[in-house]
Image (spheres, grey):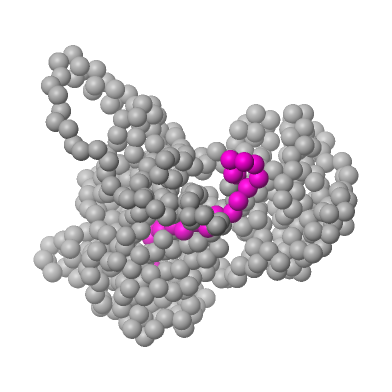
Amino acid sequence: MGDYNDNWYGQNGSGSDSYNYSSSDSNGSYSYNNSSSGSSGSSGNGGKNKKPKKKHYWAKIVASALVFGLIAGTTTYAVDTAATKVSSDNSTATASTDNTASTDNSVESSSATDSSDTTGSADTTSVSTTTDTADTNGDGELTVAEVAESTMPAMVTISTMSVEEMQSYFGGSQEYQVEGAGSGVILEINDEEVLIATNNHVVDGADQVSVGFCDDSAYEAAIKATDSDSDLAVVAVSTSDLSESTLDQIKAITIGDSDEMQLGDQVVAIGNALGYGESVTSGYISAFDRTLELSDGTTTYEATDLIQTDAAINPGNSGGALLNMKGELIGINEAKSSTTSSGETVDNMGYAIPISKAQPILEELMNQETREKYSDEERGYLGVTTTDVTSDYAEMYGIPEGVGITSVSSGSAAEDAGLQRGDIITAIGDTTVSTSDDLVSELEYYQAGEQVTITYQRASDSGSYEEQTTTVTLESYSDAQSNTSTGNNSQNSGNYGNGSLYQQIMGSASGTIN
């Protein structure tokens, strides 16, 4: 593994990526970490510890004031990524997705006593068993070792592979294969699928996903459904693909109640830290109801009502489990704090999505149909070019965030459905889209000829935007390319609403046909 840092999309000498954001918390702002490393390099902590120098009394007072007056900082997605450049040389590059599965388990797993599955979906026959949380001490709680042993059968590592396009120093662009590591928790095992909870940012944009189980086996997986607004996703592995040995050893997690947790309660975090395999850390709940704001430079995501803990949450831990001392799932690990805006180190500040908030969303995702991802030649197209309407543009011009349509090809699927230049797409089917990349990623799950509902915002004559929906019969790759190559763009009027400058942006922006 290469060196790790805590900046989102900020590349350093070791080829690391990171995700930055600031929080609306009055105590400071934070940034998510999606640390990535190149295919070469060594991992380490950097410099050695130094003996602190003595300070004057007045200096202590100033230092204390600075600690309590922090106004900015860095929190990082707890995911690990590695990028491999697809070219003739051996140089490396970085990118923003997460994953690298490791079969190295730091804590041995054991089979658990069967019990009823508390998270089974209503439309499938559940064969799931939940983790054994027997209290050997008779005091109502387990030791950290007992929590780890009883829940490890429900923990998985998640590996993804994606392709990123990056600008070269000499103009043009090149494609890079990006490999990264994340974590997951088994929610249900039924006759058809093993359903696994993780973070959306772990699998977002992934072309290939695989899951490593507690018995060191690994299997191909599919992204069942995602919710970018909550940063949650469900990954599915076909039950028929698993060996009898694997099925005998894996278990579904027991769901706890995060609302019952109190400040200072002990917790255990388990995840694929640094992509090395499952590791166990323990700490205490430091705070509740934390709000963090994440930006990748184009879109902003706000995470609310988070649990803060001093249990170590590191790159690769994203999507992993935060457990109470009964071995019950109370949170999905998501992020960590690293440094303040002044460069001071922040220790022992990790964040998890409380299960009371995550469970209803995950149950809805679990009940959705698992979809196949199609190749560029097989998937459906709208016949539009787009640009990102970011939060900055939205605030500046008083318009909705989403995917702005910059042109519509004549005779395209989009034109037939009534879409116009200037419309802002916000959802495909039940899935919210915020960027052009989101749009492309979602279209990959629809085959040419399929019908899909598009939700979009259109400016009225008064300048205000109104939400509308339309059903589009997606066109083929060849049709999309044919319409684009002839240069036949629809000249429908397209009302731009409030922003004359936005009209210029929409009129001049261009992008890949979608």
Front position in the image: 487 or 493: 487
Query: Residue at point 52% right, 66% down?
Result: 208
Residue 457 at what x, y percent from top left? Answer: 72, 45
Res. 491 in view: yes
Quadrant in which residue 32 is drawn: top left
Q: Is residue 342 left or right of residue 105?
A: right
Q: Is residue 162 left or right of residue 466?
A: left
Against 305, residue 318 (above or below) is below
- The quarter of the picture where the N terminus appears is bottom left
Q: Please identify the residue farthest to the left as the structure is shown.
A: 137
Front position in the image: 359 or 438: 438
Front position in the image: 489 or 189: 489
Quadrant in which residue 446 is drawn: bottom right
- For the stretch drawn in magenta, the main secondary structure is strand
Q: Is residue 177 magenta?
A: yes
Query: Residue at point 59% right, 54% down?
Result: 175
Residue 362 at what x, y percent from top left? Answer: 47, 61
Residue 273 at what x, y percent from top left? Answer: 32, 55
Q: Which residues are magenta?
A: 167-186
Query: Residue at point 68% right, 30% down?
Result: 397
Against 117, residue 5 (above or below) is above
